[in-house]
Image (tube, rainbow, N blue to C red):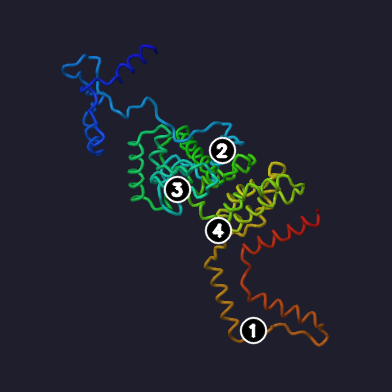
Amino acid sequence: MQGLFAVMAFALVVHEGQLWPQITLSQDPGEAVQERQSSFVSPIQMNVLPGNDSSYFRIPPEFSLAHKPLFDFKDTDVKFKVETLMNILRDRTHESWVLRAYPDPITGRPLIGAGFSLDVKATQHIQRNPQNPYQFIEPSSAELWQEAGFDLARLQNILDQFTRDLEMWTSKEFRKRIRYDELVPQLTEEEANRLLLVSVLQAIHNARAYCHDFDQLTGSQQMALTQLVFQMGINLEQFVRFLSVINEDQNRLRLKQTSTDIHENSDRWRTAQRMLIESDWARRYTDRAVTVIAMLDPIYDMDVGGAQRRVRLQIRPLHHHHLRYLRAAMHHSASSLGRPQQTHFRADRHGSANDRVLAETRTMNAHRPKPRPHRLRTEALRRRRIAHKTNT
């Protein structure tokens, strides 16, 4: 090792007029860079300079011994286990786990592994909170790919193959092949985990940039905020009310922490949960949102199932109106505009008024469209909520 350092120190010596070009302050910067680059000889074509000793070689000024990592992370920086979060993201309920490039269901952009984007460009993400010292890091897919230790040529080959696959298969055929595991893998399990780890580290860093009080959160709250950043990225900026709630004034937070009222201390996170519950994201990805939003509960670790049930009861999923239900509704509307249907029940003179009312009700229900599935689910949830209140 001492010999190696001696050789390196000897090679870095600047010999006057022989190794590096002389650059004056009045010289144009562009010409200086061009001259410096023209003086570099690659290690493969490295030759001894004429008239010099064989110990002197030209080296690039940007020469570095090690790759500088994008994220400075230690296990003690967070209160949750990174492996636990990676296991959650590998679950198909949250993110897909496909070892071959596939199109995003919404945007059609190429993804791989646990939703790793393959063609994202570097984005400038400005920190708008003056109280937060952390800056956002939004590198390109190529930079994250290199951070995981992969070659850029391999990334380009995967993108080229993805383009050829799109020419052969439709999105429906892609999903079918993914469902039945018919795609030839382009990554191994270990390589996909490396990509996922890099994405998680980026999400943790940006979660600190979103919340200046990140270190004071519980482990479950830190994991929830990291998942939100992982899934939404820079789009989390659109949740203005949610971000304003989790970044309350520090003096106000200290008063709440010294307060003896536990309910007042938890109002902050109840409000933050409500901001997410009322969003289209929660209604579109209900199962994923229930898991993430429930983690924001201050007492989540004490009652995980109860926290998830409370969130699920408040989320209204998006309703997909099928064609047959629309036709039934149109038929019902058209029939209501015409002559009302005659009751086919004829009660005798001894029949009671209740029997006649029951017959008319049956006739009206016969011409109504069948109840929709989401209404049945809502009714079941309402009955379950009433039963829960009665038992408690």
- Eye-nearest disc, 1 or 2: 2
Residue 283 against residue 73 in the figure, above or below:
below
Which amino acid, mark 1?
Gln
Label 1 residue SS: loop
Which residue is under mark 3?
125
C-alpha gap between disc 3 and disc 2: 28 Å
Which image quarter holds the N terminus? top left
Residue 343 against residue 48 in the figure, above or below:
below
Which residue is under mark 2?
87
Label 2 residue SS: helix
Circle 2 residues within 10 Å: few <14, some 14–19, many ≥20: few
Q: Left or right: where does residue 76 sit relative to residue 232? A: right
Which amino acid, mark 2?
Asn
Q: Nearer the viewer, residue 188 or 271?
A: 271
- Image spot of residue 317 (x, y percent): 59, 59
Circle 3 residues within 10 Å: few <14, some 14–19, many ≥20: few
Which residue is under mark 1?
341
Q: Earlier in the sequence, mark 4 or mark 1?
A: 4
C-alpha gap between disc 4 and disc 1: 41 Å
* Residue at screen point 56% across, 77% down: 331
- Image spot of residue 41 (x, y percent): 23, 26
- Eye-nearest disc, 3 or 1: 3
Which amino acid, mark 4?
Asp
Q: Earlier in the sequence, mark 3 or mark 4?
A: 3
Circle 1 residues within 10 Å: few <14, some 14–19, many ≥20: few
C-alpha gap between disc 3 and disc 1: 64 Å
- Image spot of residue 279 (x, y percent): 57, 58
Label 3 residue SS: loop
